[in-house]
Image: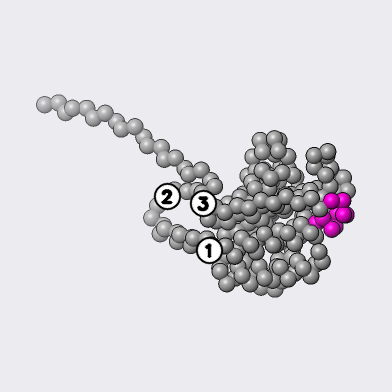
């Protein structure tokens, strides 16, 4: 896959998102920001691209995207579970409509018997709760080729997601009348439980 493929996909994605008023965030590990770079290389992309997270280390995935330590320890950084958590985390932290994540082993080192060089996990998440995961095994085709193919696949997945049902319109903020309660932004976050203080017993009046 050449860089021209990525540029064509990036232009199509930006045009579609612009027409549908959708904002995007990226969360990248093995590609190190190449997806965000492919999108922002096109003039006028700022009305679609909000931000990109480059979370190369496990600590960065946890600190910036909220990926649980238990997820990283149990399944590893290169896994379906981590890819999905990264995409959902980017969606939440950036408060955008669509997000994509990439985590993989570009090589030449870092492989294990179960996770060879060229294994890459992708996930995309939408504000309406849609999530898609894909696993690709590109093989030992060279670090640069794995990364470039990953960029193309990520753009394709975003384009497919953007073509789906339009996410619900974000509610307008309430007027400033005091302290506002913080609520979960998507169905993927647990709703906050309201704590109701126990009622005080009313003492009878003395007559």
On the question of residue 95 being in view, the answer is no
Sequence-wise, which precedes: disc 2 or disc 1?
1
Q: Position of residue 54 (x, y in %)?
A: 72, 53
- The image quarter containing residue 69 is top right
Does dot 3 land on a helix, a strand or a loop?
Answer: loop
The magenta segment: 139-147
Between circles 1 and 3, the one closer to the viewer is 1
Q: Which mark is residue 26?
A: none
In the rendered view, would you say 35 is above or below 57? below
Q: Is residue 134 left or right of residue 174?
A: right
Q: CA distance from mark 3 to mark 2?
A: 18 Å
10 Å crowding of disc 2: few (<14), some (14-19), many (20+): few
10 Å crowding of disc 1: few (<14), some (14-19), many (20+): some
Report which residue position mark 3 lands on: 185
Report which residue position mark 2 lands on: 179
Q: Position of residue 2 (x, y in %)?
A: 82, 66
Does dot 1 land on a helix, a strand or a loop?
Answer: loop
Q: At 57% across and 72% down in the image, what residue appears?
A: 19
Q: At 58% across and 52% down in the image, what residue appears?
A: 92
Q: Which mark is residue 166?
A: 1
Residue 143 in magenta?
yes
Q: At 64% across and 46% down in the image, what residue appears?
A: 85
Sequence-wise, which precedes: disc 3 or disc 2?
2
Q: CA distance from mark 1 to mark 3?
A: 16 Å
């Amino acid at each position: 896959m050449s860089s021209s493929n990525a540029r064509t996909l990036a232009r199509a994605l930006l045009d579609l998102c612009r027409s549908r008023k959708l904002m995007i965030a990226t969360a990248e590990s093995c590609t190190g920001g190449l997806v965000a770079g492919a999108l922002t290389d096109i003039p006028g992309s700022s009305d679609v691209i909000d931000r990109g997270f480059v979370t190369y280390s496990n600590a960065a995935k946890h600190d910036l995207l909220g990926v649980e330590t238990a997820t990283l320890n149990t399944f590893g950084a290169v896994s379906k579970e981590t890819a999905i958590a990264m995409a959902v985390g980017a969606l939440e932290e950036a408060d955008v409509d669509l997000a994509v994540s990439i985590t993989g082993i570009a090589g030449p080192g870092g492989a294990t018997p179960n996770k060879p060089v060229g294994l890459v996990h992708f996930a995309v998440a939408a504000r309406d709760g849609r999530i898609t995961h894909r696993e690709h095994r590109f093989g030992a085709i060279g670090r640069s080729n794995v990364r470039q193919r990953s960029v193309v696949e990520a753009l394709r997945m975003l384009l497919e997601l953007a073509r789906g049902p339009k996410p619900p319109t974000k509610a307008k903020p309430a007027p400033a009348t005091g302290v506002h309660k913080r609520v979960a932004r998507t169905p993927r976050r647990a709703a906050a439980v309201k704590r109701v203080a126990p009622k005080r017993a009313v003492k009878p009046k003395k007559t």
